[in-house]
Image: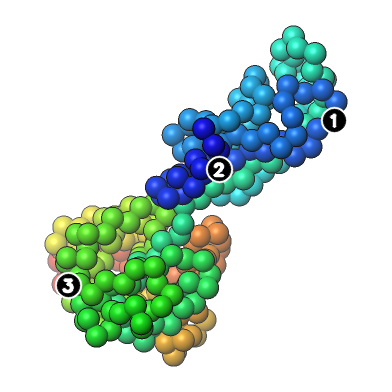
Amino acid sequence: MDIYEQIVELRRSGRRGAVATIVNVRGSIPSFRTAKMLVRDDGSIVGTIGGGCVEADVWQAAREVMESEKPRTLKFDLNQDPKYDTGLVCGGMLEVFVEPILPPALLYIFGAGHVAFNLCQTAANAGFEITVTDDRSSYATKERFPAAHEVHALDFDEAMQRLDPNESSYIVIVTRGHRDDMRILRWAVQTRARYVGMIGSKRKVIEIFKTLQKEGVPAHLFDRVHAPVGLDIGAVTPEEIAVAVTAELIAVRRHASATLPHLSWFKGVREEAEVTQEEGDAAV
């Protein structure tokens, strides 16, 4: 079974993994330099770096690398650590580099206006694979969005039935209307998407949140919503907003949570809304 083909198949199916490679060897070891082992997200493996306790430790490290999405280098001294004594004539040292295999970062943009147009370009340059959806066939075209992987001119309800965001997906809601934003957000927070962002003022966000909560959408689902969308850099124009949103997408992708202070604001909105609802105050 070819390990490289398996890596491609893993990414194509939207799954995670980690590849361990022996990068440095001194002395005798039960394998060879450049030997590789792929660990899939279900724990199964392809290939080997020699078996035994070393491989077991690397397997555990691979699982951790999948979660952190950051590579690691492991060093093993087969002379000094008794747990690596397998009775074989192996007493060398080796280094193993473990790197994450991640599925493509999928960005679903709902809306095809000026912000979406610019966001598609900046996010594509940052490495996101983009799907644009809008209910206007004159806007949702491949000619308008050449950097998009897919462009759908569909009613939003139909599009939401077709799409199935996974854990590596990002959703940005930038439609032309309050009503469309709300129904897409209702769907988005119940998907497996890693990121959900919606454009709009704080007042609009509060109104939509309270409305959806009254409809029965669990309040905790909104804790991961980024709204207003984008890092607060004072963006005004569509081009600037696209930069702010792309920067936030990158921050989430790279686990730079310290750059996302507005999430605490949104959590405060949720808690305030819960208190308001309990008190029977329906004012916005």
The answer to whether the residues at label 2 and label 1 have Cβ atoms under 8 Å apart is no
Q: Secondary structure at mark 1?
A: strand
Q: How far apart are labels 2 and 1 at the CA level?
A: 26 Å
Q: Quadrant of residue 118?
A: bottom left
* Residue identified by numbered label 3: 155
Along the line of sight, the residue nearer the viewer: 209 or 71: 71
Considering only vertical position in the picture, is 115 above or below 1?
Answer: below
Question: On the picture, is 19 further left or further right than 29?
Answer: left
Q: Residues within 10 Å of mark 2 (few under 14, many from 20)?
A: few
Q: Position of residue 202 (x, y in %)?
A: 34, 78
Residue at screen point 46% across, 38% down:
41
Mark 2 and mark 1 lie on one chain; the one further toward the N terminus is 2
Question: On the picture, is 57 further left or further right than 125?
Answer: right
Amino acid at pointer 1: Arg
Along the line of sight, the residue nearer the viewer: 25 or 272: 25
Q: Position of residue 140 (x, y in %)?
A: 28, 79
Q: Residues within 10 Å of mark 1 (few under 14, many from 20)?
A: few
Along the line of sight, the residue nearer the viewer: 30 or 244: 30
Q: Which mark is residue 148?
A: none
Residue at screen point 23% across, 55% down:
218
- Is residue 127 at all visible to an observer of this figure? yes
Q: How far apart are labels 3 and 1 at the CA level?
A: 62 Å
Residue at screen point 17% across, 72% down:
155
**Which quadrant is the C terminus positioned in?**
bottom left
Question: On the picture, is 204 further left or further right than 158?
Answer: right
Q: Secondary structure at mark 2?
A: helix
Q: How far apart are labels 3 and 2 at the CA level?
A: 39 Å
Amino acid at pointer 3: Asp
Amino acid at pointer 2: Tyr
Q: Position of residue 165 (x, y in %)?
A: 32, 56
* Residue identified by numbered label 1: 26
Q: Which mark is residue 4?
A: 2
